[in-house]
Image (spheres, helix red, strand yellow):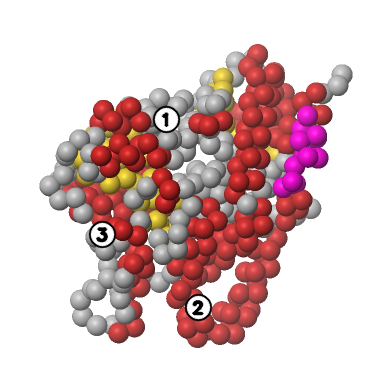
Amino acid sequence: MTDELLERAEALDEADPLAPLRDRFLAPDDFDVVSYLDGNSLGRPLRATEQRMTEFVREQWAGRLIRGWTDGWLEQPQRLGDRLGALALGAAAGQTIVADSTTVLLYKLVRAAVDARPGRRTIVLDTDNFPTDRYVCEAVAAERGLELAWIETDPSAGIRPEQVAAAVGEDTALVLFSHVAYRSGWLADVAEINRIAHAAGALTLWDLCHSAGSVEVELDAWGVDLAVGCSYKYLNGGPGAPAFAYVRSGLQGELRQPIWGWMGHRASFEMGPGHEPAPGIRAMLSGTPPILAMLPLEVNLDLLAEAGIAAVRRKSLLLTEYVIDVADRWLAPLGVEVVSPRDPARRGGHVTLRRPGFEALLEPLWEGGVIPDYRRPDGLRIGPAPLSTGFAEVHRGLSILRDLLEKQP
C-alpha cells in the first residue's frame, strides 16, 4: 500500500531549500540514531565545529597562550553577542552579550530589574514557565522581600495578554515569561504583553531558550527590556554552552547586576579597589568568558547567516505542520492528542503529543534509534530542528512510535 505521508515527506525534502545544509552536521557512520526529534533540547554538532575547535586548541590556545586575550578573546562576548543579536534576535549592536549559564543570567537580570524599580514589590510570572525561571524569581523575591503574583496558565497553551492585563498594576516591578512555552510550544504575543506591562510601569524579561534560532525574534521592535536564552538548542552550541543576555540600550545605565566580577569592571586589568561597572552591555559580565565554549555557537551563526532566520522559520512551520498531520492520521486513533497550538501564528518550533503511558515508551524508542523528549505529565515533545532535520527523518521516527503504540496492550 502506498504511504502517502512518506511520499509527502520526500516531496517536502526535495523542495526544501535548506536540505543541503543537513550534510553540514556531524553524523559518524556508526551513529545509531535514525530519527533525532529533540533539537529543542540539544542541537546536533556541525562538522565545522569539530574542525574549528581542533584548530583553536592547536593554533590559538597552544600557539598564542595567554597572548590570545589581547588577540580578541576579551571582546568575544560582545562581538558574538552583536552577531547573535543581528542574525537571530532583532537586536541592534551593543545590547547582547554571551556569558554564563541561563540560570546565572536570569538571576542577574531579575535582581537588576527589581532593584531598578524601588517601591514596587511584585514580580508577575506564570505557573507553567520553565522551573529555572520560577526558582530564580522565588530566590530573588526571598532576598529582596518581594511578592510573586502567579498567573495560572494552561499547559496546553501559554500566557495571553488579557491574563497579564489582569495581573499587573502599580506595584509590579517585573514581568517574566517565555516567548515559546517549553511544554506546549505556545508562541506568546510579546509586543502586546510588553505594551501592557509598560503601561503599568513594569519592566519585561523574556526567556528565549525555545525560540532563539527557531522562530523570528524582534527584541528592539517589540520594545523588550530584557531577555535571556541558551545557545545549545536550535543554535547548536553544545552541551552546557554559554547563554546570552539582552539589555535594551536605554536601560543599561540604570541597571546594576548583582554579581560584581573583574570582567564587568570598567578597567579589568587595573585591579583597583571597588567595583566600577563597565559602560554598556559589558557590565553584565562577571568572570572570565568561556572562550572555548563559545566556538560552536560562532560556527552555527555562520550557518544561520547563510540560511537566514526567515527561511528557518518557514521550514520550522512546515516541519511542525507535518508532525501534526502525521499525528492526526496515525497517532490520534491510538489515543494520542496534539496539545500544541494548531494556529501557526501561535506555534513555536516543537509539537507536544500527549497520551498516558508515554514515559514507558522512551526506552524502546531510544533502543530503536528514535530520540524525542519527554515532559511530565504524559507529554512527548517532537522538536525537529530546521537546519538539521529532514521530513523523511520525522516520518521514520513517528512511524516507529506508531508501531510501538500499536503493540501496547
Q: Residues within 10 Å of mark 1 (few under 14, many from 20)?
A: many
Disc 3 marks which residue? Answer: 255
Q: What amino acid type should be assigned to the residue bearing mark 3?
A: Leu
| Residue 134 figure quarter | top left
Q: Residue at x 30, y 76 (%)?
A: 266
> Do the CB atoms of the residues marked 3 and 1 lie less than 8 Å apart?
no
Element type where label 3 sits in the image: loop
> Do the CB atoms of the residues marked 1 and 2 lie less than 8 Å apart?
no
| Residue 199 figure quarter | top left
For the C terminus, the image quarter is: top right
Disc 1 marks which residue? Answer: 158
Q: Residue at x 66, y 53 (%)?
A: 307
- Residue range (magenta): 8-19
Q: Report, in whole angstroms, how far the alpha carbon at label 3 lies from the one at label 1.
A: 29 Å
Q: What amino acid type should be assigned to the residue bearing mark 1?
A: Gly
**Vertical comparison of 323 with 88: above or below:** above
**Vertical comparison of 71 with 354: above or below:** below
Disc 2 marks which residue? Answer: 72
Q: Is residue 360 magenta?
A: no
| Residue 197 figure quarter | top left
First in residue order: circle 3 vs circle 1:
1
Q: Main secondary structure of the magenta part?
A: helix
Q: Report, in whole angstroms, how far the alpha carbon at label 2 lies from the one at label 3.
A: 27 Å
Q: Is residue 15 magenta?
A: yes
Q: Residue at x 27, y 71 (%)?
A: 277
The answer to whether residue 133 is visible is yes
Question: Where does the image place residue 383, in percent across and percent down from the top left?
Answer: 59, 38
Q: How many marks?
A: 3
Element type where label 1 sits in the image: loop
Is 255 situated left or right of 288 in this image?
Answer: left
